[in-house]
Amino acid sequence: MQAIGFTGGKSLDDATAFVRFTCEVPQPAGHDLRIAVHAVSVNPVDTKVRAGIKTAQQPPRILGWDAAGVVESVGDGVTLFKPGDRVFYAGDINRPGSNATHQLVDERIVGRVPELADHPGWQGVTFHHTLNMVTGTVGPGQEFAIYSTHSFVLSLAMNRLVEAREGPGADYWTMVREDVLEPIGIPHLPISRSFDGDGWPGTPIMG
């Protein structure tokens, strides 16, 4: 199979830090599903794991968390899925990631791609549309769907919007607390932030 891996111990300025290479297609056993990977994302975990790899990796370390694809084959203990099922998952940090054409994932941490994912109503829908919906600026007659899994991305986008309009240091959830909740008698709103290793307080992601 084809994969992209981190060679380890190198700066990202080095053109050989990430390489494309060929390796054997993994064989599923037990609860494993072998997924033909169709889509991947960039997860903050990728950055954290890469930063922690200080020595050369041979073979290169395959990163990648959060992916979607089709079940190609299954281990002898699998009961929840069958070949041909469309799935999505985060994966396991202790196993090779999704930046490859194939990946093994335990069926117990996998979900089915909703049937509505192929609904024609999604055609042409962009992140801007969903953001408009969240902020109440969707035009008359327009309807868009949003799922809880989008909350981190949308919260980050909302925070960027607030920073652009109010200036550096402003954040969305503080504004919600001060301008919406405190005036109606709700003085306390715990704010969760992302974790960052450089001393920055992190991005507000949920209140």
Image (cartoon, rainbow, N blue to C red):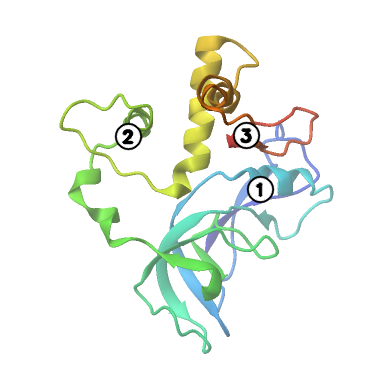
Q: Secondary structure at mark 2?
A: loop
- Residue at the image position 72 percent from the left and 39 percent from the top: 195
Q: Quadrant of residue 178?
A: top right
**Which labelled disc corresponds to residue 45?**
1
Q: Secondary structure at mark 3?
A: loop
Label located before the other in sequence (2 or 1): 1
Q: Is residue 67 above or below residue 36?
A: above
Q: Quadrant of the C terminus?
A: top right
**Which labelled disc corresponds to residue 126?**
2
Label located before the other in sequence (1 or 3): 1
Q: Quadrant of residue 60?
A: bottom right
- Residue at the image position 35 percent from the left and 35 percent from the top: 130
Disc 2/disc 3 C-alpha distance (Å): 31 Å
**Which labelled disc corresponds to residue 189?**
3
Tags 2 and 1 in contact by the CB under 8 Å rule? no
Q: Disc 1 or disc 3, which is closer to the eye?
A: 3
Which kind of residue does numbered mark 2 sit on?
Answer: Thr
Q: Nearer the viewer, residue 197 or 9?
A: 197
